[in-house]
Image (cartoon, grey):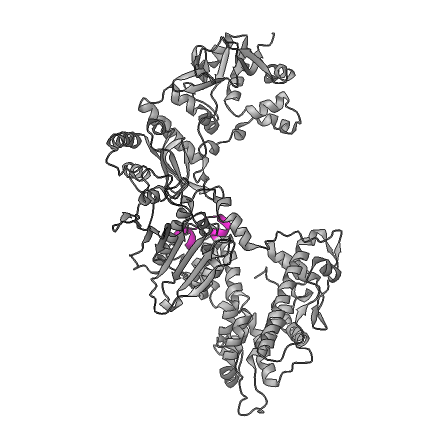
């Protein structure tokens, strides 16, 4: 692999030097130990190339593990999970990343296999790395284990190599082998062997590595051979690091700090076991950048350690894991926990295709004067490693980590595409309360492997314990939290429901679900089941009922009749948004009459992975989104601009054909339509005048009859679309606009629809230079306004008056952009007075 530093025979030769440095005079090897260690030196990195993998790295790895690698690499680069076609035939850059990653992660285990792997000569004879059969059979397994062990954790060494191996019958009796000693020497010799021989300058120029690999080459290119001073390994640079190589200097410090940790861990292990300690026990100068700069000189810059540090992780979790991140919205925690539970069940399904009983259970119970919420799934569950280094790793999504994929191979092959992405969802539970209990057992583990994790608040360290052997624990995960306030209180868990029912909360949050959700109300012995449903495949009536379900209260008969009328309207008007593969990513009506016609919440819903993320009065129905921030209470649309444009055109056609595209709707759509299409149909109203609404087709004629125009632009004069009229903001009374006055309809639609087409995209590029003007010149005002309906009107005004933009705006600039006119009641109205230039 061209990006890797040198791992050829010169590296093997250098390992004897660093082994001698690490051992010092304290440790000696007998000939048998030297032979075994030498073979391990040769083998340990022998698999750092594709040739060591037989036919290909992919075939050696196996399709399941390869697809898992592709899945994670695709997600890391593209921000989304691949579909089956992309999984089977990834882009070349993804394949290259996966091949390098596979070699890094598996080369140690592959090296173990090379001991017994035969190669064939041109004449068909078998060739082994260890030709002597007896030595290969006796020492081969140990050599393979030692070669693989340099990639293991230090804590594993004692368990694997705690024994002593006696000599062969034909050897002297003192030729015993201590595998632990050899494993420690190999590990530290390999770790400490970094110098310019690993990254020759000529080879660097030939291979031209990129990214992080380049920085590795650059810093190793600078390093001289290490030497031992006391019990410290001392490295120095051959030449100073210029400012262009500052990143390599910092990487060198981080890398040598890693070596320092390895030396200290091994020394601690040998000391605790009462074994002979090695001479090298730490690295010199790595405790601070200032001391490191004495050994690794810099040129033209000074290293200051300004790295972002988190010294108090529990305090960070307390600050960001609850209200500070999610706001005072306790239902958000339920949404996050449901998402985690659904991911767990879907992960198990992908590994166990015959597993058909996946479910999520949600219970709200009252006990001892308080309330407890419990969410349980029978999904994949967690082992202790995942629990402590996955779930509790704040800010890191476990599903995208290689460690999870290696312990659960086959997730990608099973079609698993997790919803979680930020690695903080679990910590939202502290919105609900500080006392949290989590019980989990992996689906393929025994009851004795179940674990219990208890929190007494986000700022205190949790307590991890095994469960008593007599207790039966089901597969999956159960999360219980003691609520800090009653669910029926203001800002309580059920605050946003109409009927204070847990079932309605779950329906509100889970707009679609791939796993059945069973809900138990407080004090109830029965359960409600939210059956699996897909918004992408549901019919318009099914989608409407899922988004706006009927009320369960029989007293609301009139409200239900109104809902059914709106349902019929939605079925007749809603059109699909489709992605570039023809898949539905929305079913909605542009604008939302229903929001104003009922006291129920009929806002349009933006979903992220089928769960509620945001609401908007700009549409009815649903649009798929992606989170705009980690709290996922704001979302942007996944649809592209062209896909939204197509949907808007279909909506316009639908409204026109239904006879619903009147003046009110036109005024409400005008701004967004103009931003989307950079033009406005001649018959779409966009402004109010004394004569009524004004359309593009009538602008030039209207303006040509005027010698001056006053664009009213501020309080107390305002406008409304239903009916289209101007009104006094303070009194609410309708106002008849004076002659020559105009009000241009502003932005009505709200995010996320309105943000798909920002004004800046349509601005006049000829005046972009003015954005840097330090005062509001007429050029800057025009550049800011040219992309919207103001720009549309002024362009037509210039056509009607045969003048330039400068001749209209320059006089207004000279008056400091402050013109006023008065209504009949003498109320001053701010705006811009535009006068026809003299011919």
Image coordinates of residue 215 in percent, x first then y, are: 64, 57
Q: Quadrant of the C terminus?
A: top right
Query: From the viewer's perspective, is 512 left or right of 69?
Result: left
Image coordinates of residue 300 in percent, x first then y, are: 76, 51
Q: Nearer the viewer, residue 628 or 798?
A: 628
State how many labels appear: 0
Residue 583 visible (yes or no): no
Image coordinates of residue 284 in percent, x first then y, are: 70, 66
Q: Nearer the viewer, residue 100 or 565?
A: 565
Residue 503 against residue 810 in the figure, above or below: below
Magenta residues span: 74-89
Residue 82 counted in the magenta span: yes
In the figure, residue 253 lies in which quadrant?
Answer: bottom right
Q: Nearer the viewer, residue 343 or 715?
A: 715
Query: From the viewer's perspective, is 265 left or right of 237?
Result: left
Residue 134 visible (yes or no): yes
Query: From the viewer's perspective, is 548 left or right of 211?
Result: left
Residue 498 against residue 467 in the figure, above or below: above
Q: Quadrant of the N terminus?
A: bottom right
Image coordinates of residue 367 in percent, x first then y, are: 35, 52
Q: Nearer the viewer, residue 52 or 799?
A: 799
In the figure, residue 172 lies in which quadrant?
Answer: bottom right
Residue 149 counted in the magenta span: no
State whether the magenta stretch is mostly helix, strand or loop: helix
């Amino acid at each position: 692999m061209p990006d890797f530093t040198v791992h050829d025979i010169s590296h093997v030769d250098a390992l004897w030097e660093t082994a001698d440095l690490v051992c010092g005079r304290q440790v000696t090897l007998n000939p048998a130990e030297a032979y075994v260690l030498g073979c391990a030196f040769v083998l340990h990195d022998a698999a750092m190339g594709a040739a060591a993998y037989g036919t290909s790295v992919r075939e050696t790895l196996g399709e399941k593990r390869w697809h898992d690698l592709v899945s994670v690499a695709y997600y890391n680069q593209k921000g989304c999970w691949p579909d089956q076609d992309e999984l089977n035939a990834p882009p070349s850059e993804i394949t290259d990343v996966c091949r390098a990653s596979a070699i890094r992660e598996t080369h140690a285990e592959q090296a173990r296999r090379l001991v017994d792997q035969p190669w064939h000569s041109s004449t068909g004879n078998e060739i082994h790395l260890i030709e002597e059969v007896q030595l290969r059979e006796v020492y081969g397994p140990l050599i393979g284990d030692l070669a693989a062990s340099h990639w293991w954790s230090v804590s594993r060494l004692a368990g694997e190599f705690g024994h002593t191996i006696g000599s062969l019958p034909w050897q002297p009796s003192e030729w015993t082998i201590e595998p632990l000693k050899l494993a420690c020497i190999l590990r530290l010799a390999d770790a400490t062997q970094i110098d310019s021989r690993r990254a020759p300058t000529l080879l660097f120029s030939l291979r031209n590595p990129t990214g992080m690999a380049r920085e590795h080459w650059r810093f190793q290119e600078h390093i001289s051979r290490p030497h031992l001073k006391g019990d410290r390994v001392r490295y120095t640079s051959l030449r100073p690091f210029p400012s262009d190589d500052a990143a390599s200097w910092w990487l060198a410090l981080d890398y040598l700090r890693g070596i320092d940790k390895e030396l200290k861990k091994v020394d601690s292990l040998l000391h605790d076991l009462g074994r002979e300690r090695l001479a090298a026990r730490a690295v010199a100068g790595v405790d601070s950048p200032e001391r490191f700069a004495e050994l690794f000189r810099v040129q033209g810059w000074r290293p200051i350690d300004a790295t972002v540090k988190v010294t108090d992780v529990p305090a960070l979790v307390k600050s960001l894991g609850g209200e500070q991140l999610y706001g005072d919205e306790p239902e958000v925690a339920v949404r996050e926990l449901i998402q985690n539970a659904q991911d767990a069940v879907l992960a198990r399904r992908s590994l166990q295709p015959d597993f058909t009983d996946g479910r999520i259970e949600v219970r709200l119970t009252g006990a001892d004067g308080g309330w407890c919420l419990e969410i349980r799934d029978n999904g994949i569950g967690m082992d202790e490693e995942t629990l402590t280094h996955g779930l509790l790793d704040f800010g890191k999504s476990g599903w995208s980590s290689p460690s999870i994929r290696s312990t659960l191979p086959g997730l990608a092959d099973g079609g698993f595409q997790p919803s979680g992405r930020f690695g903080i969802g679990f910590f939202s539970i502290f919105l609900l309360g500080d006392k949290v209990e989590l019980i989990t057992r992996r689906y393929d583990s025994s009851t004795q492997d179940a674990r219990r994790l208890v929190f007494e608040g986000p700022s205190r360290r949790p307590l991890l314990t095994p469960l008593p052997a007599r207790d039966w624990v089901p597969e999956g995960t159960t999360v219980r939290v003691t609520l800090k306030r009653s669910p029926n209180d203001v800002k309580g868990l059920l605050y946003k429901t109409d009927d204070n029912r847990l079932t309605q909360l779950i329906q509100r949050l889970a707009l679609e679900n791939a796993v059945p959700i069973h809900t138990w109300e407080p004090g109830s012995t029965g359960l409600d089941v939210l059956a699996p449903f897909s918004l992408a495949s549901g019919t318009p009536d099914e989608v409407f009922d899922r988004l706006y379900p009927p009320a369960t209260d029989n007293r609301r008969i009139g409200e239900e009749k109104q809902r059914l009328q709106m349902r019929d309207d939605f079925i007749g008007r809603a059109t699909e948004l489709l992605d570039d593969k023809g898949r539905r990513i929305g079913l909605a009506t542009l604008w939302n009459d229903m929001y104003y016609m009922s006291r129920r919440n009929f806002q349009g819903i933006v979903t992220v992975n089928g769960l509620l993320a945001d609401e908007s009065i700009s549409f009815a129905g649903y649009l798929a989104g992606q989170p705009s921030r980690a709290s996922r209470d704001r979302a942007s649309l996944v649809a592209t601009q062209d896909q939204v444009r197509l949907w808007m055109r279909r909506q316009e056609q639908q409204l026109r054909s239904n006879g619903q595209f009147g003046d009110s709707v036109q005024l409400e759509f005008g701004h967004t339509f103009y931003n989307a299409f950079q033009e406005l149909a001649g018959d779409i109203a966009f402004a109010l005048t004394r004569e009524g609404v004004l359309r593009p087709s009538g602008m030039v004629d209207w303006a040509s009859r005027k010698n001056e125009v006053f664009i009213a632009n501020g309080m107390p004069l305002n406008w409304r679309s239903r009916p289209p009229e101007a009104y006094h903001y303070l009194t609410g009374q309708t106002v008849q606009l004076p002659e020559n006055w105009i009000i241009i309809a502003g932005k009505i639609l709200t995010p996320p629809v309105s943000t798909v087409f920002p004004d800046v995209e349509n601005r006049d590029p000829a005046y972009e230079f003015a954005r840097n003007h330090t005062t509001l010149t007429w050029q800057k005002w025009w550049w800011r306004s040219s992309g919207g309906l103001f720009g549309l009107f002024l362009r037509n005004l210039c056509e009607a008056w045969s003048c330039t933009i400068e001749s209209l705006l320059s006089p207004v600039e000279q008056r400091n952009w402050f013109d006023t006119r008065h209504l009949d009641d003498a109320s001053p109205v701010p705006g811009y007075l535009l006068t026809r230039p003299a011919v």
